[in-house]
C-alpha cells in the first residue's frame, strides 16, 4: 500500500475517540499534510519540514493500533513544533524536542483518552521521552496489547525456546537463550547467530 492522503473526517478511524479535535487543531493551524503509509519495519512515522512551496509533511504507519497511531502522530507533531521555533538550530531529539513532545503528550493525556495502563506509562516518560516509541520498551510492550493480531504474528519473547519462527523474507530462525534484553537466535539456513528484541513480531512455525 503506497502512501495516501487521508480525508480529514476519515482520520477519526485511526485515532482514539476524543482526540480528533485536538489533532485537527494542529493540522489546520500549521497546514500539515498528513499521509498514511504501509507498515515500515524501521520507523513508525516521519516528519518533513516545510520548504518553499511545500507544507509540513507527516506520515504515519496505517497498521498501528489507535493509541500507537496517536502517540506516533504526536511525536511527529512535536518535531514540527520544534522546527517552527528553532529551525535547524537544534538536534532532532534534543531537549527542545523532548520539551515539545512532553507538552503535547500532557495535553492529550489530560483528555482521558488513553486506557489507564497506557496513561500511567506515558506519565512516566513525559519529562524525558524516548526518541521513538520503539525505544521505550515499557511503552511499546503496553501498546502492543492493543494490536490486532489477525495476521498471526507473535512476539519473539513469546516464542518458546528452541522453537522455530519466520521473519519477512522467509528467513527461519530457532530461538535461543535470552541475553540481557535481547534473544540469541540461530538462522537455520546460514547457521549464524542474531540478536532479536523480545518485542519483534515474527511468525511462529508450528
Image: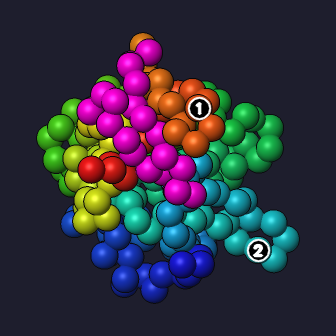
Residue at 65% over, 67% down = 57
Reading the image, the residue beneath label 2 is 54
Reading the image, the residue beneath label 1 is 191
What is the magenta range? 160-179
Residue at 34% over, 70% down = 14
Is residue 102 shown to the viewer in this render? no
In front of the other: 190 or 146: 190
Q: Quadrant of residue 66?
A: bottom left
Q: CA distance from mark 2 to mark 1?
A: 49 Å
Q: Are there few (<14), some (14-19), or many (20+) residues within 10 Å of tag 1?
A: few
Residue at 47% over, 40% down = 173
Q: Secondary structure at mark 1?
A: loop
Place of residue 169 in the rendered image (x, y in percent of width and height, measured from the top left): 57, 57
Place of residue 135 in the rendered image (x, y in percent of width and height, measured from the top left): 49, 33
Q: Is residue 168 left or right of residue 121?
A: right
Q: Secondary structure at mark 2?
A: loop
Q: Is residue 114 above or below residue 8?
A: above
In front of the other: 88 or 124: 124
Q: Quadrant of the N terminus?
A: bottom right
Q: Is residue 59 left or right of residue 89?
A: left
Place of residue 141 in the rendered image (x, y in percent of width and height, measured from the top left): 30, 37
Amino acid at each position: 500500500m503506497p502512501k495516501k492522503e487521508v480525508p480529514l473526517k476519515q482520520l477519526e478511524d485511526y485515532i482514539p475517540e476524543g482526540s480528533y479535535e485536538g489533532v485537527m487543531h494542529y493540522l489546520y493551524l500549521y497546514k500539515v499534510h498528513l499521509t498514511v503509509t504501509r507498515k515500515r519495519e524501521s520507523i513508525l512515522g516521519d516528519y518533513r519540514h516545510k520548504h518553499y512551496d511545500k507544507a509540513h509533511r507527516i506520515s504515519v504507519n496505517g497498521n498501528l493500533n489507535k493509541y500507537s497511531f496517536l502517540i506516533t502522530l504526536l511525536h511527529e507533531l512535536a518535531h514540527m513544533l520544534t522546527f517552527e521555533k528553532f529551525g535547524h538550530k537544534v538536534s532532532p531529539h534534543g531537549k527542545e524536542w523532548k520539551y515539545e513532545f512532553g507538552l503535547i503528550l500532557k495535553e492529550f493525556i489530560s483528555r482521558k483518552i488513553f486506557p489507564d495502563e497506557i496513561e500511567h506509562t506515558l506519565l512516566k516518560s513525559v519529562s524525558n521521552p524516548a526518541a521513538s516509541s520503539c525505544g521505550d520498551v515499557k511503552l511499546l510492550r503496553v501498546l502492543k496489547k492493543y494490536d490486532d493480531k489477525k495476521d498471526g504474528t507473535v512476539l519473539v519473547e513469546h516464542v518458546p525456546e528452541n522453537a522455530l519462527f519466520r521473519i519477512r523474507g522467509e528467513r527461519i530462525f530457532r530461538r535461543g537463550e535470552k541475553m540481557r534484553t535481547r534473544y540469541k537466535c540461530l538462522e537455520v539456513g546460514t547457521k549464524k547467530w542474531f540478536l532479536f528484541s523480545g518485542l519483534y513480531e515474527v511468525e511462529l512455525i508450528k
